[in-house]
Image (cartoon, helix red, strand yellow):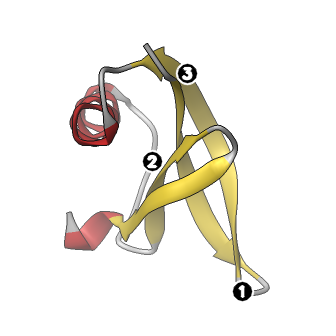
């Protein structure tokens, strides 16, 4: 199974900079996004509508959304 990284990020100087991350395995990208959203829901981190959820596989981001748009 591929290894994924989900990150909670903030936009700084036009780039997403993670302030918390988690690693996990998933069967495919769709499952990885679902698991990342579940992880986000289970965190006690202070996020706001300006925070982003980003999911990466093999170092490349394939999903990035503002928390307020999820």
Number of numbered labels in the structure image = 3
What mark, if any, has residue 23 been given in the picture?
3
Mark 2 or 1: the one toward you: 1
Which of the image's four quarters has the N terminus?
A: top left
- Name the one closer to the observer, 2 or 47: 2
Q: Of marks 2 and 1, which one's residue comes earlier in the chain? A: 1
CA–CA distance between discs 3 and 1?
A: 24 Å
Residue at (72, 86) in percent of width and height: 14
Up/down of 26 relative to 32, above or below: above
Of labels 3 and 2, earlier in sequence is 3
The answer to whether residue 64 is left or right of residue 17 is left
Under circle 3, the secondary element is strand
- The location of residue 41, given as percent across then percent down, is 24, 35
| Position above or below: 48 against 53 | below
Residue name at image x 70 percent, y 44 percent: 59
Of the 4 image quadrants, the one containing the C terminus is bottom left
Q: Secondary structure at mark 2?
A: loop
Q: Residue furthest bottom?
A: 14
Foreground mark, 3 or 1, reads 3
Specify few, some or many for label 3: CA neighbours under 10 Å numbering under 14, 14-19, or 20 or more: few
Q: CA distance from mark 3 to mark 2?
A: 20 Å
Q: What residue sits 45% from the left and 38% below the top?
A: 45
**Displayed quadrant of residue 29:** top left
Residue appearing at x 27%, y 29% in the figure: 35
Which residue in the rendered view is the most extreme toward the right?
13
Q: Nearer the viewer, residue 58 or 12?
A: 58
Q: Which residue is the site of mark 2?
A: 46
Q: Secondary structure at mark 1?
A: loop
Depth-wise, is mark 3 or mark 2 nearer the camera? 3
Which residue is tagged 1? 14
The location of residue 37, given as percent across then percent down, is: 26, 40
Q: CA distance from mark 2 to mark 1?
A: 21 Å
């Amino acid at each position: 199974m591929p290894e994924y990284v989900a990150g909670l990020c903030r936009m700084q100087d036009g780039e997403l900079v993670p302030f918390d991350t988690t690693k996990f395995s998933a069967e495919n990208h769709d499952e990885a996004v679902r698991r990342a959203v579940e992880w986000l829901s289970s965190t006690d981190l202070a996020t706001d509508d300006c925070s982003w959820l980003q999911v990466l596989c093999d170092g490349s981001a394939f999903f990035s959304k503002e928390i307020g748009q999820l």
